[in-house]
Amino acid sequence: QVQVVESGGGLVQPGGSLRLSCAASGIIFRLYVMGWYRQAPGKQRELVASINSDGSTNYPDSMKGRFTISRDNAKNTVYLQMNSLKPEDTAVYYCNAWAMIVGRTYDYWGQGTQVTVSS
């Protein structure tokens, strides 16, 4: 059974930092592209960052500079370091595991973790 579980969300003041973690089980973790997405109330889910199996990373232009994604294949875990947080970063943050293996797509989501940036 595949499980993708986020942790590390919470309430933080503007300018503060948080580190999110996502632990995956039931998959061959090193084969998967891991991504962090977020969804604010009334808005569409958007990509924050992704990291490929070879460790290369991808950030949309709007996310460059304050967010850093990393992975530890030995721990089946991906991280999102968030710095200089702003109120507009308030959202539910979701972890995604995606892979194409032998022509078949595998796509798993976590339940999300709430991040609230407020004074």
Image: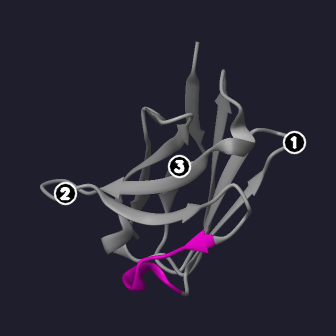
Q: In this image, 73 relative to 59: left or right? A: right
Q: Quadrant of residue 117?
A: bottom left
Indicate the position of residue 87 as horizontal and vertical percent values.
Answer: 34, 73
Q: Which residues are magenta?
A: 57-64
SS category of the residue bearing label 2: loop
SS category of the residue bearing label 1: loop
Q: For residue 80: magenta?
A: no
Whether residue 82 is visible, yes or no, is: no
Q: Quadrant of the N terminus?
A: top right
Whether residue 103 is visible, yes or no, is: yes
Q: Tell me the amino acid under the disc marked 3.
A: Gly
Tag 3–tag 1 contact (CB < 8 Å): no
- Disc 2: CA contacts within 10 A as few (<14), some (14-19) or many (>=20): few
Q: Quadrant of the C terminus?
A: bottom left
**Which residue is label 1 attached to?**
74
Q: CA distance from mark 3 to mark 2?
A: 19 Å
Give the residue displayed 81% in from the left and 46% down from the top.
73
Foreground disc of the pair 2, 1: 1
Q: Tell me the amino acid under the disc marked 2.
A: Gln
**Which residue is label 2 attached to?**
44
**Which residue is label 3 attached to?**
9
Indicate the position of residue 14 as horizontal and vertical percent values.
Answer: 46, 76
Lower position in the chain sequence, tag 2 or tag 1: 2
Q: Quadrant of residue 52?
A: bottom right
